[in-house]
Amino acid sequence: MVFFGTNIFDSGFDFDIEIRLGAGAFVCGEETALLESIEGKRGQPRVKPPYPAQSGLWGKPTLINNVETYSNIAQIILNGSQWYSSIGTENSKGTKVFALGGNVNNIGLVEVPMGTTLREIVYDIGGGIPNNRDFKAAQTGGPSGGCIPKEHLDTPIDYESLKEIGSMMGSGGLIVMDDTKCMVALAKFYLEFTVSESCGKCTPCRIGTKRMLEILTKLCDGKGCKEDIEKLERLALNIQKASVCGLRTKCTKSCN
């Protein structure tokens, strides 16, 4: 139960809440871009440091997390930190909610302890691939995430493990793909979204993703050459290193 108002229970403590309606920009999934948007500015990421906990909304220390994170606070207070730490892995505690979709029999929201393997999610919870098709890959982390191929089916799903194989947790999207899917076409699909949603603040993302999309379009049209793969990899690595926010493509992972 949460209480709002002035001088709550004569404690001298005031607590109020204000709801801001955003424009729905994908880049505002990055915390500092969201802060800019809340302040009435264009949603573009800030250079860090300083981090929001040091200087956030209107220059004040700010907690800016998603609803899923905040929803754990009450349970931790009620059950204790040791209870919460007993769930998950050594470095990734608690559970994670995934939006399981794509070529899987059981589509929907699933909540699993951190460290649950991709195979368990796809086959035990998701019920496997329709029509007994083979698993090809799973895409995690949204358009700026990466694709996990079949050889990593037994990878535990936690922050460190996903990062190690070139993907990310993101907001919990988990799209399963069977052996009929073309990974190059998939990479092109996500690049189209990334190009459209780039806030344009930094040159690597603003221009680099456009060049990547041009190369992928060539490949999908059957006009590519061997050198295009090398260009894609070089562009992807440079964009990842030099761009300001998390709107960074991992398309080389998809292409591979």
Image: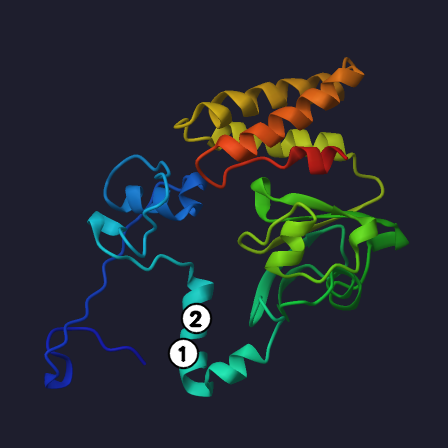
Out of 5 and 251, give the one closest to the viewer.
251
> What SS does tag 2 mark?
helix
The amino acid type found where label 2 is placed reads: Ser
Task: Say which residue appears at 68% left-offset and 20% top-offset.
Answer: 231
Q: Position of residue 202 (x, y in %)?
A: 42, 27
The image quarter in which residue 253 lies: top right
Question: Is 229 rendered above or below residue 101?
Answer: above
Q: Say if residue 116 shows up in the picture.
A: yes
Task: Say which residue appears at 51% left-offset and 84% top-offset.
Answer: 82
> How would you rate the neighbour count of disc 1 (Cα within 10 Å): few for under 14, some for 14-19, many for 20 or more?
few
Give the quarter of the figure containing the C terminus.
Answer: top right
The image quarter in which residue 179 lies: top right
Q: Which mark is residue 119?
A: none
Question: Is 147 rendered above or below residue 172?
Answer: above
Residue beneath disc 2: 71
Q: Say if residue 221 shows up in the picture.
A: no
Residue beneath disc 1: 74
> What SS does tag 1 mark?
helix
Task: Say which residue appears at 10% left-offset and 79% top-offset.
Answer: 12
Q: Position of residue 100 (x, y in %)?
A: 66, 57
Q: How many marks?
A: 2
> How would you rate the neighbour count of disc 2 (Cα within 10 Å): few for under 14, some for 14-19, many for 20 or more?
few
Task: Say which residue appears at 25% left-offset and 50% top-offset.
Answer: 57
Whether the residues at callouts 2 and 1 have beta carbons within 8 Å, the answer is yes
Specify whether 56 is left or right of 121.
left
The amino acid type found where label 1 is placed reads: Ala
